[in-house]
Every structure is written in structure tokens, then in C-alpha cells.
Image: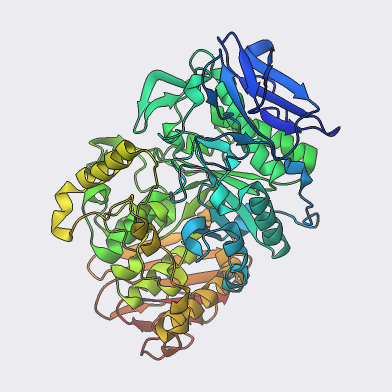
Amino acid sequence: MQSINISHRTLGATVLKDGSVEIRVWAPVKHSVELDTGGRRLPLYAEEGGYWTLRSTDLRPGDRYQLRVEGGDALPDPASLAQPDGVHGPSEIVDTARFAWSDSHWENPELDRYLMYELHTGTFSPEGTFAGIESRLDHLVALGVTAIELMPVAQFPGGRNWGYDAVFPFAVQQSYGGAEGLQRLVDTCHRRGLAVVLDVVYNHLGPEGNYLGAYGPYFTSKYQTPWGGALNFDDAWSDGVRRYFIENALMWLRDFHIDALRLDAVHAIKDFGASHFLRDLRLCVDQLQSETGRRHYLIVECDLNDPRFIDPIEEKGFGMHSQWIDEFHHALRVTATGERSGYYADFSSISQLAKAYRDAYVYDGQWSEHRKKHFGQPATNNTGRQFIVFSQNHDQVGNRMLGERCSALVSFEMLKLMAGAVLTAPFLPMLWMGEEWGEQNPFLYFVSHSDPELATAVREGRKKEFAAFHAQGEAPDPVSEETFLRSKLQWNLLEEDRHNSLLRFYRALIRLRQNEPALYTLDRSTVSAKASESEGTLVLQRSGGGQSLLCLMNFSQKAATLTLPVADSSWELRLYSAAEEWGATASAPGDGLSGESVELQPESFILYTHPDV
């Protein structure tokens, strides 16, 4: 692996301790690079490996600049830290060391204790900014989550985007609050006891404002992705690309005090070299931890059902700490709604949900009808903390044609049952913003490209994608500001009884998750999950910390009778989703003895514990 500077960023414009500014850009196979400050041009000097650099005592934080490659057009810096005038404008010098941190007391929790809350900065609050998130941290702390997960915040075109069209990985979106706004949010979260996970995109860049190709071979034609040519992680000159993204990851962790990174769709990072990019990234993050004493995690989204991504490096894995498990979501969604279209075609029974509890991967070598091949590998040696589960997230909601949340698809009682299914799982749970009160607004796909042709292409592409679903209506226009505004959370719903009742339910369930040893101990070896296809029920048992847990779930629309398993002591009732206090009508059944029968209302669950003797 090439040598990477761990202690500070070397790419882009860096304000040094003596006040001078150093600019470094990777532009191999080029004959000249100039700095253009609007009033003058200065040459950069060639270094080894295709790098060009300049140090100046005349530049200051806040100064605007551009770069010219071989006398061409003035372009933004590919490692720009700020684009105040958008993706096509000049870059701005930012001193990330200027921020006065107050989080020296902060200690990133053990990953086992992460309970994540995914949110989109632009739609989470009316303000649509980092400051807007700060103003609602009281809500998140009271809810009981331990980490917020920010959808990508790197600079994208315009002011409306999910974040996956970013083209400046080092620059913080200006409309959100820029670099200082993000630092302030992280600092405040740490003071409130919340970790911060940042979603980063290393598998592609967006189509508008993407100037990397003008500097060098950042992309390769060896592979194709859904977004075009792949980023160059293993072709000629790939060292510079790998360094670019590793430095980016280290910057977020070191200079912005981010606690964990969520890497988008790592199956689309095409790297068949001897040492995979993810492996090298993990090694560098470990070095950073050794230098700073701060703990960091790397979380991946990967749809390959391949434990190699999360296996330890010493066992020939890539060493990622945890991964999203979409298959748990799919099995839960099909059990709750009966949907069968698209990738749900591989999921048809509650038994698959039981398998997800036991094995994490539903497909670990079986034939996949959706993929038309045998798919997956068993993950029997991986721990519960290495898997993240959810009932909804930005993808599973936003990639529906109408962006419907679960609240638009299932009953109020089923919402509580789905929450119970996630929060009693032997894995790390994640919530999607607004689910805790049953938010009714959709989360739609939206963009704000300034290029009219690109905007038209996105609009037509969205229509084509959902051409088979015209019976449901027409896909909302992703370019329209109205589509974005419709996706904002309605905080006023918390004033309504039904929504407030659901919020209280989530808080109670999360308290149990955080305080009961059998729930927060993620020992997969103790998990038993048995489903009845005919009854639509599932019995989940777990244990840990001297306590056993029993969760009886009824996904059917009729009452079900289940028998309490044999235990050394009585089963203590901890939560019943159909009880009156949670907006339902049933009476709580009370504690139970081994062999007793318990009746569950339709679409409900009941949670018991007992101490191990």
C-alpha cells in the first residue's frame, strides 16, 4: 500500500500552522498546472506521482481560487473544501483547524450500543440546515437513539438533492451550513451524547459539475456502473484515486470528528487489485485511531451477501465493522404488506424473516429467482454488531415511485409491530427520520440541476423507470421544488394524539432495548426464531447478561394463541403493543408461567423477560 499522511490532509488548499497556504492537486500526465486567483496566475510545481504543489503566504482563508490545467479553462479544485457559488464556481480556502472544539470529553460508544437514526439534512427540519438539526436534538435525545446518520453532505448541484449526486467529496454543502456548520453540529451532538455517522459516496460522482476527468485518470473504462464509467481503483494511475478517497475519509474522521462512516454501495467499488481499497482504508483508519486515541467505525452498504466485506483483515477480509442488511427489511416488508414485485420476488414467507433473525442473510447460497442464480455465502462466524437492520430507510422509501413511508402502507398496529421486529433483533437497529411518530409525508426523489438538458434527462428517466406503474399515478417531477417540499417532515403531527402515542411507544421500546441485557447483548448463538406460515406468527428468543427474552409476534389479521416456552421462572411482561396505553384497545395479559397460553391481538407483539437461574 502507498504511504498516506494520517495526521493531516495534503490535497486541496491547506492552511498551515505558520499561516501560509499550501495547494496540492493530482494531475498526472499533465505538463502544467496554474493557480488562478482572479487577479493573477501562479505556477504549481511538479512532485512525484503526478502531484503539483504551491505554497503561498499571500493566500488567506476565505480567498477564492481556481486551477488551470495546461492553460485551459479555470476550474474548481477537485479537493475543494468549499464551493460558495456552486459546483461550477471558484473554490474557497477553508481552515478546518480554526473551529474551537468542546468535545474532548467525548468517547465514541462501543458499536454494540449504537442505535442509529438516519436523516436527510434538507428535509429533517423546516430550515433544512445543520442548525435545523441542532434545534431538534432534544427530540432525538428523548427518543433514546445514540447516533444520527447523516445522508451525504458533500457539495452537490443546487440546493435540493439526496446527496448522491455530489461532485466535490471534500466540500460540505454550502446551503446546509458549510464546513463550520457541520463541525458545530458534530460538536453539539457529542455534548448531547450522540455519535455522528456520515454517509459518503466512493463508488461514483454526480453528472453535473464533475471536473475530475479534466485533471487526470480518476475514472476507468474497464468497468461500467449504473452511473457510467467506474472510479479508477485498480487501473493505471489508480494510486492517486485511492489516496484521494482515503484522505477524504480521514478528513471527516479527524478534522470533523465524525464517529463512523457509512460507505454507499461498496459492491460498486470496482477493485480487483491485490489489496482492496476497503482493506487499505481500514488500515489507515486504524493508524488514525492509534494517533488520536479516538475510536471510529466503517459501515458499508453491500448487496452481495458476502461476509468477506466484514471479516477481519487477518482472516483475509476487508475489515469493515458492520453492514446494512437489506434482506431483513425485505423479509419484514413482505411479511407485513404482502408485496411481491421487483426484488421482493425473492421473499414470500414469514419463515424468511425467522431466517434473517437467525442467519442475518436470507440468501446464503440458495437459488435467487430475482437474480436467476445461486446467491450469497453464510455469515455464521460474524457477530450481531456486524449487521444493521431497519424497517425503512431513504432507499426503501425514496426509491418507490410515490415515496410512500410505511405509515401509508400498513395499519397503525402494524407500524408498532414492525418497530418491535427491528428493535428486538440481535443486530444493530436503525430508524428512518419521522418513523417514530408515523410521518405521513412521502420521501420523494428530488434534484436541482442547473443544466436544463440534464434536468430533462433525469425527469424522463424517472418516468421511464416507473412506466409499468402508471396505474398508481405518475412519478412526481424530481426537478420541481414542490417535490422537495412535500418530502419535509411535519413536526406539527406530534401534537396529535395518535402520532404522539406512537412516539411514546417508540421511546418505551427503545428504553427496553438500551437497558435490558437480553436485548443489548448481541450474542447470535442464543437466538431462536420459529415461524408459523399458517398462523402468521413468529416466536423470537434471545438471552444475554443473565436474562432471557421472549418476543411473540402476530403478523396476521386475526387473533392468535401462542404457548409460553418452558422457563425456570415466570415470564415477566415488559411490553404489549396492543395495550390501551399505546393507542389500542386490548388489556395487557400480565406475567405468565411456562406452558400457559397467551392470546395476541391481530398485528401485535408481546415482549417478556425472565432472569436466568
Q: Position of residue 540 (x, y in %)?
A: 43, 66
As drawn, the residue found furthest toward the left would be: 471
Q: Residue 447's x, y, as percent?
A: 38, 48
- For the question of whether residue 285 can be seen, the reply is yes
Q: Is residue 576 visible?
A: no
Quadrant for the N terminus in the image: top right
**Quarter occupied by residue 376:** top left
Determine whether 501 is above or below 362 in the image.
below
- Closer to us: 244 or 549: 244
- The residue drawn where x is 47% and y is 44% is 380
Frontmost residue, 266 versus 596 = 266
Residue at screen point 50% across, 12% down: 236
- Residue 504 lies left or right of residue 394; in this view the side is right
Residue 343 in percent (x, y) is at 27, 47
Q: Position of residue 419 (x, y in %)?
A: 43, 68
> How many labels were placed on the picture?
0
Asked if residue 313 lies left or right of residue 225, the reply is right
566 to 124, vertically: above or below: below
Side of 58 relative to 114 (left or right): right
Residue farthest along the right direction in this orientation: 18
Q: Pick out the residue farthest to the front.
A: 39
